[in-house]
Image: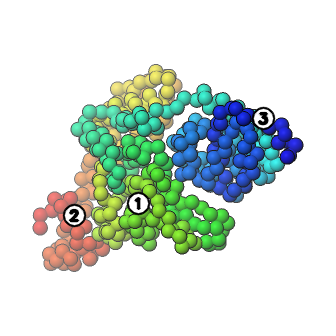
Amino acid sequence: MDQTDKHLPATDNVEKRYFLLLDPEGCLQQCRQKLQNTAWRCVPVDNAAQALQAIHKYNIQVAVATINTSNQHFLANEIDTIHQQFPCIYWLGISDTPLNKDNSWLLSANFVDYYHLPVDWCRVINAIGHAWGMAQLCPTIPALSSKNPVIPDIQGDHPILQALRRNLQKFGAADETVLLSGETGSGKGLCAKWLHQLSKRSDGPFISVNCGALPSGIIHSTLFGHEKGAFTGADKRYIGQIEQANGGTLFLDEIADLPLDLQVHLLHFLDDHTIMRIGSNTPLKVDCRLLFASHQDLESAVDEGRFREDLFHRLNVLRLHVPSLREYRSDIMLLAQQLLDDCLGADKNMVFSDDAVKAICSYSWPGNVRELRNRIHRAVVLTDNKIIQAQALGLSANTIVESCEALNLQRAKLDADLLLKAVTENNNNISAAARQLNISRTTFYRLIKKCNIQL
């Protein structure tokens, strides 16, 4: 027995409490043995997906993560995923070597205490106990519990918002693939989270991946995972995002940016829910719900050969349109007030001036809710008194909407002129006109309809 072991508190008659050990590389296999005669029971996991299941099963409130200089980015992603579901867990870190100011960036963001090997297990146990006591003071979040159903917090009575609420409730209860469409910044990601929280998988992980933000060289490994040694630089096994979503929901945003070769792999997964990590010949069954989103017109992407038609039909099971702000302009001030209240917190003592209200209601909001939120945050910082002016929002009280509508009309006229010119030059041969413009016949006919052209 180590010298530190003989001082560990023996607790034969004390109720066991569980803590999580996030140890992807198996560095602390001795941990369970060290703590077997204490009041603590260790639950080891390799990744966030396993952690979420364990936290829910054992009501875990304290977690320990093993840190080394090469796995901090992986740990940051895993802890962030866990934090989205269980924000009140207290984290302690144990590293294989001492960390310094150059390689300890992860600690200040996530951990309440830190040790390096070899550790004094008495001190670790005391720290776990202290963290557990602090966790008792942290309130739980009812929205994350399946016993307290989530109600989408959508402000406004506009018919299009009422339809969105109804569809979120219906689609959330169904365990089917959903395709979310809508402009950039309209709230597709938030709706995806609501769909997850409204589903029977709400206690499982919610994994979100922006396909457009991943470099093409790593997107396959990111989604499907890889084995150690599968390629140069693969110095350890990586559990892909699809596998991390096991038992929960996988949200693939900007799906139109997924390369064609990976679209084939995704189609196979949708058919049989089986994946293989890069470098492995062993198929793995993954039970997760798929949600997709894109601000692009996927039908046009199919016509142009940028997106597989069979994949489009496979993921387009349920279609949820997330409206732009322009589609419910009459309720925009309700949303603006909610965003202002959220920004101010308890200090809700700012109001919009008349010119600010006029500017908000007139502006076309190309960035939608995201742009509205950012402009309100900007205004709160710039406003010295209690009244927010249009200038602080970076807007003018002039008839902005009229100029934007005029611009849209001008664009439509240019499109119509271009289409008519191609038709005339090709003697009314639609196929030849479409080839001249380098678009498909289907896209050509869709543009003709959009521009109200009579041929």
Residue 425 lies in what quarter of the image?
bottom left
342 up-or-down from 298: above or below: above
185 up-or-down from 240: above or below: above
421 up-or-down from 208: above or below: below
Q: Where in the figure is residue 238, as x and y percent of width and height?
A: 60, 61
Which circle, 1 or 2, is nearer the viewer? 1
Q: Earlier in the sequence, mark 1 or mark 2?
A: 1
Q: Residue 255 carries which label?
A: 1
Instruction: Tally the numbered discs.
Output: 3
The residue identified by callout 2 is: 446
Work out how far the residue at label 1 is from the one at label 2, CA to CA, in angstroms: 22 Å
Residue drawn at (45%, 65%), measured in percent from left and top? 274
Q: Where in the figure is residue 222, as x and y percent of width and height?
A: 54, 62
Residue 327 lies in what quarter of the image?
top left
Residue drawn at (30%, 49%), measured in percent from left and top? 321
Q: Is residue 259 visible?
A: no
Residue 83 lies in what quarter of the image?
top right
Task: Give, as a three-letter code, the residue at label 1.
Answer: Ile
